[in-house]
Image (cartoon, rainbow, N blue to C red):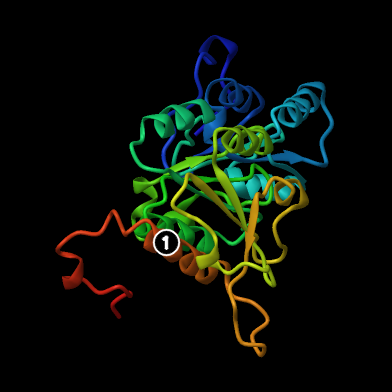
Amino acid sequence: MDTNLPSSHRSAPPPLNAGTIVYGIHPVEELIATRLRQIDRLYFDGERSSGPLFELVKLARKERLPYQMVPTQKLDFTAGSRNHQGAVALCSAKEYLSPETLLEQLLKKPSAPLLFLPASVEDPRNLGALVRTCVAFGVDAMLLERKNTAPVGATVAKASAGMLERISLVKPKNLEGLVETLAAKGFAVVGAIQGAEKKPPDVDFTVPAILITGGENRGIPPYLAKKCTHFAGIPIAAETESLNVSAAAAILLYECARQRGFPFANEHAGSRSVVDKK
């Protein structure tokens, strides 16, 4: 598909489906203007210099969008075309909810909301597994960083076993500010770190809460750690250095659900297996 559209046809970006690739200076520019929340990552040609491309990079920085400067060959491969003008956008398999809409929904919720923030999860299979775990234990929404987070594409959708459509995702421009806003509204901000003095049952998860975990290669980033009101750690055997992020999240979210009385449980739950069938 030729996305190098004339200016008279740039009122809207191309229709977006799961994992859509949009390329070309003007289409990517319009995508940022009209569907900012569906952009997962931008790629720019590090071997090309032009005024319009430089302005597009500046716009990406301004909007705090994750982007990479890559060789021309990678852009050719990603776009499936050489007609990309040095700009390619990778779109999410699911449109992100705006922070304003999230807050509106949470205020209408009769019970205490539960949010999950997996910081720096870069493996899409882990992110998909986390989506599935969040749905299993009644999480209302997942908050994602714009940077250092795996793109929400086909791999995440597959690893979630269809659960991606059953949870809200929020990827705000100012994640730190959103966490601050929620904390000011009474949310407990609980960071999961190894060696914390408190164990998960010691933390009150019956109140509105945000649970934050680190990723595969790093812990909770300092800018989020300083927003935590509590820290909790999972006791594990000394021979085990750490748990996979999705395994740790399952333990923590189970404790959240247990304290809340498993409000999502139904009478037919006993007839289903809790693990994947081979």
Rendering coords of residue 148 (x, y %): 68, 51
- Quadrant of the image occupied by residue 93: top left
Name the residue nearer the viewer: 166 or 9.
Answer: 166
Evaluate whether residue 63 shows in this view. yes
| Looking at the image, residue 75 lies above or below residue 177 | below
Is 172 left, or right, of 218 in this rendering? Answer: left
Name the residue nearer the viewer: 182 or 261.
Answer: 261
**At 49% across and 36% down in the image, what residue appears?**
96
Name the residue nearer the viewer: 276 or 20.
Answer: 276
Rendering coords of residue 147 (x, y %): 68, 45
- Quadrant of the image occupied by residue 83: top right
Rendering coords of residue 213 (x, y %): 61, 59
The furthest residue to the top: 8
**At 42% across and 34% down in the image, what residue appears?**
106
Is 198 left, or right, of 134 in this rendering? Answer: right
| Three-letter amino acid code of the residue under disc 1 | Thr
**At 51% across and 29% down in the image, what residue appears?**
98
The furthest residue to the bottom: 239
Evaluate whether residue 160 shows in this view. no
> 10 Å neighbourhood of mark 1: few (<14), some, or many (≥20)?
many
Rendering coords of residue 66 (x, y %): 69, 41
Q: What residue would you read off at disc 1?
A: 133
| Looking at the image, residue 200 lies above or below residue 92 | below
Q: What element carries label 1?
A: helix
**At 76% across and 22% down in the image, what residue appears?**
52
The C terminus - image quarter? bottom left
